[in-house]
Amino acid sequence: MIKKDIQDWHELTRLTAGRDFVVERVRLADKGIAIEGAFAPPSLARLTAEDQVFVAAFVRAHGSIKEMEQVFGVSYPTIKARLSRIAAGLEFVDTSPGPARSEVLERLAIGEITADQAIAELEIQS
């Protein structure tokens, strides 16, 4: 089953050719549960199959460009250029979110910030 899943995924990435797509139904195979809606796949899933293999190899190599040179038989600049191209197409998650809503409201309540500052901070979170 896994081999067919991989083949299906390769076919999907070939068909979408890097274009945005939406998943409208997700089925948990072992549970018999299906969820319908509009789900945007993560940016890694939108990479071509070849780029997904490259990223997986990079992770397996623990980020070692030297090891990637050996695996793919190409030069350091080639590996760096490909990583840069892939990275440019990825959306990154902000790992430093702003303060929690309750923290902003508490700072407002004790007069540490103005109402306008609180509004601005809360809008950033939305």
Image (cartoon, rainbow, N blue to C red):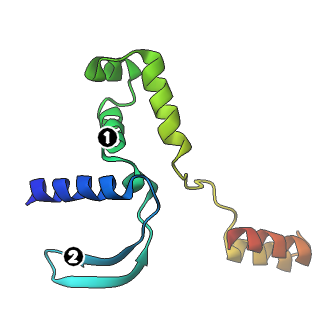
| Residue 58 image-quadrant placement | top left
Q: Quadrant of residue 21?
A: bottom left
Mark 1 falls on what kind of element? helix
Name the mark on residue 73.
none
Quadrant of the frame with the C terminus: bottom right
Residue that appears at 45% across and 31% down: 82
Compare marks 2 and 1 and give the one earlier in the sequence.
Answer: 2
The amino acid type of the residue labelled 1 equals: Glu
Residue at the disc numbered 2: 28
Taking the image as shown, residue 104 lies to the left or right of residue 21, namely right
Q: Position of residue 104 (x, y in %)?
A: 76, 72
Give the structural element (helix, strand or loop) at label 2. Answer: strand
Please tell me which residue is depicted at 66% across the width and 70% down the height of the picture.
Answer: 100
Q: In this view of the protein, can residue 111 be seen by the observer?
A: no
Residue occupying the far left of the picture: 1
Q: Residue type at mark 2?
A: Leu
Please identify, in this view, whether the residue under mark 2 or under mark 1 is nearer the observer. 1
In the image, residue 113 sits, relative to residue 6, either above or below, namely below
Q: Mark 2 touching mark 1, by CB under 8 A? A: no
The CA distance from mark 2 to mark 1 is: 26 Å
* Relative to 80, 104 lies left or right: right
Pointer 1: what residue?
Answer: 50
Quick one: label 1, few (<14), some, or many (20+) residues within 10 Å? few
* x and y percentages locating residue 20 in the rendered image: 47, 62
Q: Answer with left or right where residue 19 lies relative to residue 124.
A: left
